[in-house]
Amino acid sequence: MCSSTRAADSNTWGCPPSYDSGAIMIIMRFLLPVLWFLLGVLVAYAWISTRRRIKKSIEVPPPRIDEDDIRRIEREGSLLTDDPEPLDLEQIGREEDEFWKETWDEPGEL
């Protein structure tokens, strides 16, 4: 059995080696900032890649008009495409006003 106090003539063959606490502190002082730096880099990479993916998903491509479309516009005066129509802000305002004019029933007591 190992004890913290040793007699002058005791044998220490059975004791496990002790580690130098100074060396462990030096390693930890170096390792912890490196780990925090790597964690920061990982968070920054995730943030940037998420922003790019979101930006790409909501991006609306510009309408593609070729020479045939221009000739059709000149003949007919308009062009029908599959592109999404722009938002009608007046219609959106009317729908919102109608929504808020509705009366809401109070929840019944249980």
Image (cartoon, rainbow, N blue to C red):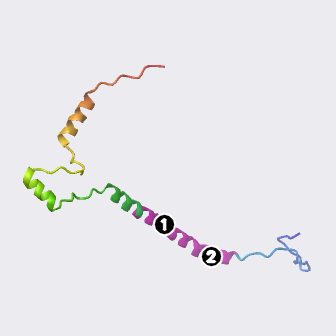
Q: Residue at x 45, y 19 (%)?
A: 109
> For numbered disc 2, what is the local secondary structure?
helix
Q: Residue at x 64, y 74 (%)?
A: 25
Does the magenta run of residues contain 93?
A: no
- Which residue is at the front of the view, 41 or 72? 72
Residue 7: image x %, image y %?
A: 89, 76
Position of the N terminus by quadrant: bottom right
Residue range corresponding to the magenta coloring: 21-48
Q: Residue furthest right?
A: 9
> For numbered disc 1, what is the local secondary structure?
helix
With respect to residue 69, does 29 lie above or below? below
From the image, give the main secondary structure of the stretch colored magenta: helix
Q: Residue at x 25, y 28 (%)?
A: 101
Residue under pointer 2? 27
- Which of label 1 and label 2 is nearer to you? 1
Residue under pointer 1? 42
Left or right relative to 71: residue 106: right
